[in-house]
Amino acid sequence: MARDNKNNKSFYGTTTLGEKGQMVVPAPARLKMNLKKGEKLLVFGFGNDMLAFSKLENLEEFASHLADKLKAINEIIKKIDKK
C-alpha cells in the first residue's frame, strides 16, 4: 500500500531488477499514475543511485518546471553581477 505524506511524495514498496534489466512497477503506483500496459515513461537519474519516472505526456510540464527554475537562477546571477 502506498504511504503518502504532506509533500505529495509516496512510497510504494520495493521491486527487483530482473536479468534483462526489467522491473515491475508496484500496482499501487500504477494505479495512482494511471499507467497502462505499453505506456512510455521518461527515466531520470539523480546522483549515482536514484531514478525517477514520469509519463511521457508530462514532458511539457517537466520542461516548464525546469524553465521556471532556470529563470530564477538567472535572476540571482544578474543580481550578483550588478554588485
Image (tube, rainbow, N blue to C red):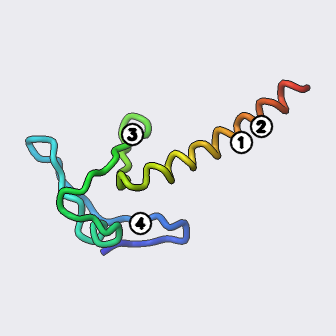
Task: Specify few, some or many for label 2: CA neighbours under 10 Å numbering under 14, 14-19, or 20 or more.
Answer: few
What amino acid type is highlighted by mark number 1? Ala
Between 80 and 47, the residue placed more toward the observer is 80
Mark sitting on residue 72: 1
Query: What separation in Å lies between label 2 and label 4 (alpha carbons)?
Result: 32 Å
Q: What is the quadrant of the C terminus in the image?
A: top right
Q: Which residue is most to the right?
A: 83
Q: Earlier in the sequence, mark 1 or mark 3?
A: 3
Query: Residue 10 got which mark?
Result: 4
Q: Amino acid at mark 2?
A: Glu
Kindly state the secondary structure of the residue where label 1 is placed.
helix
Q: Position of residue 20 (x, y in %)?
A: 10, 41
Q: Disc 2 to disc 1, how far (Cα)?
A: 5 Å
Above or below, 49 against 40 in this view is above
Disc 1 and disc 3 in contact, CB within 8 angstroms: no
Looking at the rendered structure, the kind of residue marked 4 is Ser
Q: Residue at x 35, y 51 (%)?
A: 56
Tell me the mark number nearer the camera, choosing from 2 and 4.
2
Q: Are marks 1 and 4 in contact (CB under 8 Å)?
A: no
Element at label 4: strand
**Quadrant of the rendered image containing residue 72:** top right
Residue beneath label 2, please? Answer: 75
> Disc 3 designates what residue?
45
- Extreme residue toward the bottom, this view: 1
